Amino acid sequence: MTPTELPVAAADGHRFRLRRHGLGARGLFWIPALGVPAQKYDPLSDALAGAGFTTVVHEWRGMGSSSLRAARSRDWGYTELLRHDLAAAITALDPQVRWAVGGHSLGGQFAAMLAAERAMDWDGLVLAATGLPLAATFPGRQRLGVQLFARVLPALTAVAGYYPGHRLGFAGREAGQVMRDWADTVRSGHYRAYGGALPLDAAMRGMDGPVLALRFSDDWLVPEASLQALLAKLGRGPHTVETFDAARLGATADHFRWMRQPAAVAARIAGWLSA
């Protein structure tokens, strides 16, 4: 299915395009993982469209259709991603559609922020391979590696002027402040206000909407403890956790492989949204 591209302009002049699949009365606004262009979710969107849902996929600043690229002279962080880009993207959504919000990895964390601050706008929250990246939620050597990575990020991004993830093998070419904001969460376990009136932690505690969390058994980037730490922030609403192993997924159940073979994931999301 060929997607429809929806042009969006943020308040600070950043331009990008959303990708829409399907024309259902119910929809899912989806936020990608860090460093992943929107078009990589076309297989998921196609599968959901086949089940009767509209899917609109966000584009990160600096990725794909974005008019900007990270550089020493062009930096941004969570504040711009949340208050400029996502705020503008939401205005492009069809108001006649009943929308849920969801995301993959860092995108799931931002989806949780939107669900917390704009609870009346969403029918539910869908998280895929998402958790709180607090170093303490990782086991053994992974914990030490995550802690070290978070410590060196401020110096690395200061020297390079941006985060050269395309050379390091983790994420893409990212803005330095994005990575420093991520590192702050790794160290503290908290979500700040990012230009809002209150810290996002406080808004999340007030949530009472439904959450579907999809975990993948071979995903070392999001241990079970990381997912549970994020869910513990998300208020008292009903939380449904589904774990996909290789047999259920039909592929290695890691952080990214499900994107290429999303049939089982799309079926579970569609069933949950329809309930």
Image (cartoon, rainbow, N blue to C red):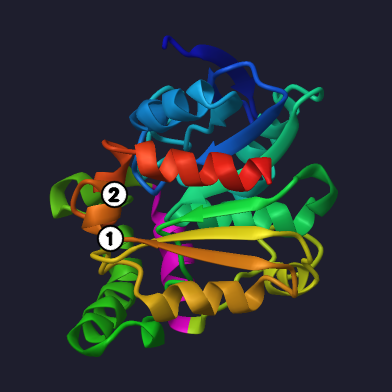
Q: Secondary structure at mark 1?
A: loop
- Measured as percent of width and height from the top left, residue 72 is found at 36, 45
Q: Residues within 10 Å of mark 1 (few under 14, many from 20)?
A: some
Q: Which residue is mark 2?
A: 249
Instruction: Please tell me which residue is depicted at 41% across the width and 35% down the height of the picture.
Output: 62
Q: Is residue 236 left or right of residue 13?
A: right
The correct choice, above or below, for 178 with respect to 85 in the image is below
Instruction: Please tell me which residue is depicted at 64% across the width and 76% down the height of the picture.
Output: 233
Instruction: Please tell me which residue is depicted at 39% across the width and 88% down the height of the picture.
Output: 136
Q: Amino acid at mark 1?
A: Asp
Q: Residues within 10 Å of mark 2 (few under 14, many from 20)?
A: some
The correct choice, above or below, for 193 with respect to 223 in the image is above
**Where is residue 215, by image quadrant?**
bottom left
Name the chief secondary structure element in magenta: helix
- Measured as percent of width and height from the top left, residue 196 is found at 76, 59
Q: Which residues are magenta?
A: 175-187
- Measured as percent of width and height from the top left, residue 115 is found at 71, 54
Is the Cβ of the residue at disc 1 closer than 8 Å to that at disc 2?
yes
Residue 134 seen in this snapshot = no
Instruction: Please tell me which residue is depicted at 51% across the width and 48% down the height of the picture.
Output: 103
Q: Is residue 81 left or right of residue 24?
A: left
- Measured as percent of width and height from the top left, residue 9 is found at 64, 23
Q: Secondary structure at mark 2?
A: helix
Residue 159 seen in this snapshot = yes
Q: Amino acid at mark 2?
A: Leu
Check residue 76 in the rendering and tell me which mark sits there, or answer none: none
Q: Which residue is mark 1?
A: 245
Asked whether residue 15 is drawn in magenta, I would say no
